[in-house]
Amino acid sequence: MNKAQFIAALAPHFNDSKKEAAHAVDIVFDTIVRTLHKGEDVMINDFGKFKKVDRK
């Protein structure tokens, strides 16, 4: 599932508004990225853990 498909799947929960669903997805992803930039991990129960990994 890509981002567009994810947004389409969420749209029914936002009165079929893909714009509102996309905004919600962007807020979630932005929050995860900003938290990782601060050096903190993000753990979402029943979903997954995000952590910054330095690549060589």
Image (cartoon, helix red, strand yellow):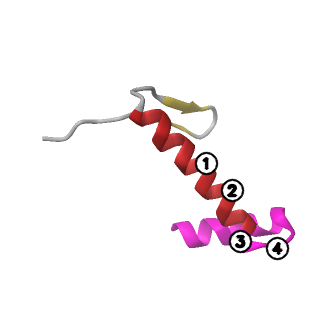
Are there few (<14), some (14-19), or many (20+) residues within 10 Å of tag 3? few
Q: Is residue 53 above or below residue 8?
A: above
Amino acid type at circle 2 is: Ala
Q: Which residue is mark 1?
A: 28
Amino acid type at circle 1 is: Val
Instruction: Provide the secondary structure element on which disc 1 rests.
Output: helix
Examine the image and state in which quarter residue 15 appears. Answer: bottom right
Instruction: Provide the secondary structure element on which disc 3 rests.
Output: helix
Give the Cα distance between marks 4 and 3: 9 Å
Give the Cα distance between marks 1 and 4: 19 Å
Q: Which residue is mark 2?
A: 24
Confirm or deny contact between disc 2 and disc 1 (CB under 8 A).
yes
Residue 32 spot, x, y in % from top left: 52, 41
Q: Which residue is mark 4?
A: 16
Residue 31 spot, x, y in % from top left: 56, 42
User: Which residues make up the magenta segment?
Assistant: 1-19
Residue 36 spot, x, y in % from top left: 43, 35
Q: Earlier in the sequence, mark 3 or mark 2?
A: 3
Residue at x 65% of width, y 67% of height: 7
